[in-house]
Amino acid sequence: MVLMTRWLNPDEQQTWRSFLTATRALMETLDRELQRDAGMPHAYYEILVRLSEAPQRRLRMSELAESSGSSRSRLSHAAARLEAAGWIRREECPTDRRGQIAVLTDEGFATLAAAAPGHVEGVRRHLFDALSPAQLDQLRRISETLVAHLTGS
Amino acid sequence: MVLMTRWLNPDEQQTWRSFLTATRALMETLDRELQRDAGMPHAYYEILVRLSEAPQRRLRMSELAESSGSSRSRLSHAAARLEAAGWIRREECPTDRRGQIAVLTDEGFATLAAAAPGHVEGVRRHLFDALSPAQLDQLRRISETLVAHLTGS
DNA sequence: CGGTAGTGGTTGAACGCTCAACAAAACGGC
DNA sequence: GCCGTTTTGTTGAGCGTTCAACCACTACCG
């Protein structure tokens, strides 16, 4: 029995293409702004944010990868750059000799503190200001549903 | 007068982070599937799709960039690869000697035809199947609003 | 016409990401 | 305690994207 493709109908196509265009444009805009104003890509910004929120601004590499939505490899490469920039430092883990602990330096924290207002302003301008409160609520539920669906299966 | 940062409140943070996680996970999943099954990144797939829908399967480079959501540079590099793969061909434009016209080859069309069912299935599984009809309608409106907002300003 | 501004497209360097392979250490069953 | 398995993190190659610089051509305006 041949499994027929469930093609998208015109309405679904429109949804999908608008979604693609919107997310791509939004992310590119924010990434460009962050690169221009803070000299870092959005992925690096997010790594620094998660570190800054952790107790003592330190996290195991694996937890940092998890929470920042990076692969281990990605984080490893990123950490090398962030360390070279003086924004983080890597320490050995006392309880697991395989482990590494990423620590946000004061300089890294200062850089993040300088970058954050502009970035948040960008997020507000390009996303939150564009949508109604009801739409933002819808977007939250949709996103949460998708996250559950994508990480669950 | 100092302009205070309009920080995100906890609800907004939750919305933003879920949105980020969801779109990142969705795009990474689809990209990986496409790379695995069709040997091309999603950006290339989209270029081929737009070409396949154009009259005579041909488009000026600039229009192709516009419609596929690529920068000119990106498309130029991509076109080089797609041409090397035998999926497109570039012709001179008769009315503008600066111009180039990208043409989808039969081989390119066949590759696209082979890749499409799997990709559409992925989009359905990871996005459409996860959301209710009402949510999909909301997502369409939200996306359209964002596109208008991002391209308008 | 002639010059200047704008457009179309390409290029190369720098950079970030993915993937697969790898080393080192921890775990788990027996 | 030992051996296979799993986990942690890194590495290098290959690839795609960005950015800025650039050339060739067109369009506009006096």
Image: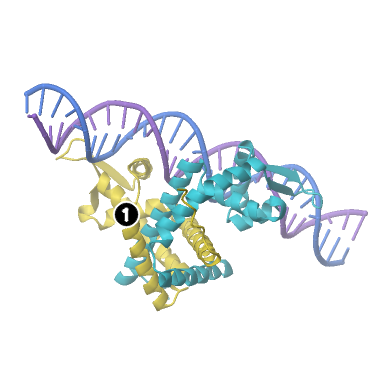
Chain colours: A cyan, B yellow, C blue, D purple
Residue lying farthest front? B1
| Callout 1 amino acid | Thr
Q: Is residue B109 visible?
A: no
* Residue drawn at the location 49% of the way across and 69% of the way down: A140
Local SS, label 1: helix
Q: Quadrant of residue D3?
A: bottom right
Label 1 Cα neighbours within 10 Å, binned few <14 / some 14-19 / many ≥20: few
Q: Which residue is mark 1?
A: B151
Residue A52 in percent (x, y) is at: 64, 52
Q: Nearer the viewer, residue B26 or A94?
A: A94
Residue D25 in percent (x, y) is at: 18, 32
B106, above or below A90, in the image: below
Q: Quadrant of residue D24?
A: top left
A68, above or below A115, in the image: below
* Residue drawn at the location 33% of the way across and 48% of the way down: B87
Q: Indicate left or right for A119 with A60 as reference.
A: left
Q: Indicate left or right for B139 with A111 as reference.
A: left
Q: Quadrant of residue A68?
A: bottom right
Q: Nearer the viewer, residue B42 or A149?
A: A149
Q: Indicate left or right for B68 with A110 as reference.
A: left
Q: Nearer the viewer, residue A82 or A119?
A: A119
Residue A130 in percent (x, y) is at: 38, 62
Q: Is residue A118 visible?
A: yes
Q: Nearer the viewer, residue A68 or B11?
A: B11
Q: Chain of mark 1?
A: B
* Residue drawn at the location 79% of the way across and 52% of the way down: A96
Residue A99 in percent (x, y) is at: 75, 49
How many numbered marks appear?
1
* Residue drawn at the location 58% of the way across and 70% of the way down: A152
